[in-house]
Each structure stands twice: as C-alpha cells, then as structure tokens.
Amino acid sequence: MSFWMHLVKISPAHLPAIREQPGVLLDLFSEDGDAEPPAGFDRAADLLEFQFFPEEENVDHHHWLSTVHRVGEALGEDFDHGDLFAVGPGQVAAVVGMLPGGSPVRAFFAGAAREGRAVVGGLG
C-alpha cells in the first residue's frame, strides 16, 4: 500500500484563514485548484508531495500522523488518511526532532523551522 504526502509551508499570518477554511489546502495540492494561493506562495519551494511505501521504507504512517497531530492540530477537514493538519511555527522544530533522520519530511520541516513558517498538509 502506498500513500501521498502533501505538505505546504505557509506564513504564520495565513494560519487563521487556513483554520477557517482548511479545504483551500486541497487547491494548493493541485495546479488546477480554484482558490487563490496565499501571497508569497512558491509552489516549487513551499510544496512537498511524494508517494511513499511504508512497508518498503520501514515508516509507520500512523506514528507519523500521530506525531504531527500530537504537536499540531487537526483542522477538521477529512483527507484520505485523517484530517488535514496544521503545525504552527513554534511547534515545527519539535516535529523535526521526532521524525526519522534523512527523511524528506524531516528536511521539509527543518526548512520551515529555519524560515519561521508553519506547515499544513495531509496524508492522502
């Protein structure tokens, strides 16, 4: 079984709007979305999407999601494998320390921590 990871780095100023309408994230995951992306959003630099196979990579996606949800917050918008989520900029560094070294997810969160940004996304 495989999953698609969808992560977006955003300015903390955009978190209230995302919390109010988390469905707008689905448009950020797609180039064909109707919603206008947040100001300053750079699809190439701020979006991480990749397919992974937990069995092959020895990654427990339930552990990953519980880590993110424990530190961040569920947004109440169902995505294929749980709610879309948000991790505030003050919590992003804590997530980095809980993720396996060398993973693209850890690198993405580490970049967001350096930039003082929040991370929102979901597992599809």
Image (tube, rainbow, N blue to C red):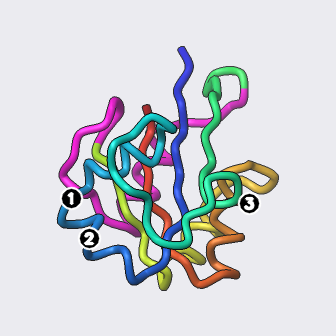
Q: CA distance from mark 2 to mark 1?
A: 6 Å
Residue 81 lies in the magenta-colored region: yes
Secondary structure under tag 1 reads loop
Residue 53 lies in the magenta-colored region: no
Q: CA distance from mark 2 to mark 3?
A: 26 Å
Identity, as a three-letter code, of the amino acid under mark 1: Gln
Q: Position of residue 122 (x, y in %)?
A: 42, 45
* Vertical comparison of 28 with 113: above or below: above
- Residue receiving disc 1: 21
Disc number at residue 31? none
In the image, 61: left or right of 112? left
Secondary structure under tag 2 reads helix
In the image, 115: left or right of 92? right
Near-viewer residue (25 or 53):
25
Q: Alpha-carbon neighbours of circle 1 within 10 Å: few (<14), some, or many (≥20)?
A: few
Q: Position of residue 55 (x, y in %)?
A: 64, 21
In the image, 82: left or right of 2? left
- Residue receiving disc 3: 107
Disc number at residue 17? 2
* Vertical comparison of 65 with 56: above or below: below
Residue at horizontal 36%, vertical 42%?
Answer: 26
* Vertical comparison of 61 with 99: above or below: above
Residue at horizontal 51%, vertical 48%?
Answer: 64
In the image, 79: left or right of 109? left
Identity, as a three-letter code, of the amino acid under mark 2: Ala
Q: Earlier in the sequence, mark 3 or mark 1?
A: 1
Q: CA distance from mark 3 to mark 1?
A: 27 Å
Identity, as a three-letter code, of the amino acid under mark 3: Ala
